[in-house]
Image (cartoon, grey):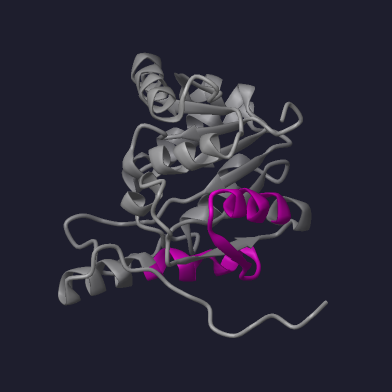
Amino acid sequence: MSDLPTIAVVGGTGNLGYGIALRLAKAGYPVIIGSREADKAQGAADEMTAKLGAGAKVRGLANGEAAAQADIIFMAVPFASHDATLGQIAPHVRGKIVVDTTVPLVPPKVARVHLVAEGSAANRAQKTLGPEVRVVSALQNVAAAHLRELDHAIDCDVLVTDDDKAARQAVIDLIAAMGLKAWHAGPLDNAVVAESLTSILIFINKNHGIDGSGIRISGEPAAS
């Protein structure tokens, strides 16, 4: 297992980030939980180790240091913290893959789609981090509570958008290790669709009393 990439989850003390980190750590990946406060990150790592057992490779660091020590970085922060977090990790992610899960939700109207000037939060991340960073967009439409329940089969597919084939496949493989089916959904510009779907799912959850609705892609891929 030593050849597996080290994964940082920036914002890993939040609901979504913790769920991503938990599932990747369970799959055997070395995981670094990132937070604005290193002590808070290490506390979450200790809690996760207690859940998974002493063999789990989980530790906690401040966001920038977590990004510096990782091969692949997941960013799972509220939109209000998006720009500041990008600034924290930017000096440490050159040549790496950054998976942006951010949705531009604007409280209190989180069930209403909000579009940013760049088209999507993922496009903003790519513009901020620069061309030497491979930004991939994914995991906007999976309820955090589902990810945190390890014995729970998740009835939800994941849309993955990006502009780099190798980065895309690496992220699809990680999502498969988390127990989910991922679909290549086109270039990074298409991230606006997955991000916007989150507001629609929030509305559906509230209007129909569903506990964490998701999406499924129907049909079977043609044999390659």
Residue 66 spot, x, y in % from top left: 54, 24
* Residue 109 picture quarter: bottom left
* Residue 190 picture quarter: bottom right
Residue 15 or residue 103, whichever sits in front? 15
Q: Quadrant of the C terminus?
A: bottom right
Magenta range is 169-197
Q: Is residue 118 above or below residue 98?
A: below
Assign the magenta stretch its main secondary structure: helix
Q: Is residue 54 above or below residue 129?
A: above
Residue 6 spot, x, y in % from top left: 64, 30
Based on the picture, tell me whether residue 170 belongs to the magenta stretch. yes
Residue 26 spot, x, y in % from top left: 52, 37
Q: Is residue 7 left or right of residue 85?
A: right
Residue at the image position 71 percent from the left and 30 percent from the top: 1
Residue at the image position 32 percent from the left and 68 percent from the top: 213
Total marks placed: 0
Farthest-out residue, top: 39
Q: Is residue 133 left or right of residue 194?
A: right
Residue at the image position 16 percent from the left and 57 percent from the top: 108
Residue 48 or residue 104, whichever sits in front? 48
* Residue 156 picture quarter: bottom left
Residue 187 or residue 216, whichever sits in front? 216
Residue 35 spot, x, y in % from top left: 40, 26
Based on the picture, tell me whether residue 141 belongs to the magenta stretch. no
Q: Is residue 217 left or right of residue 162?
A: left
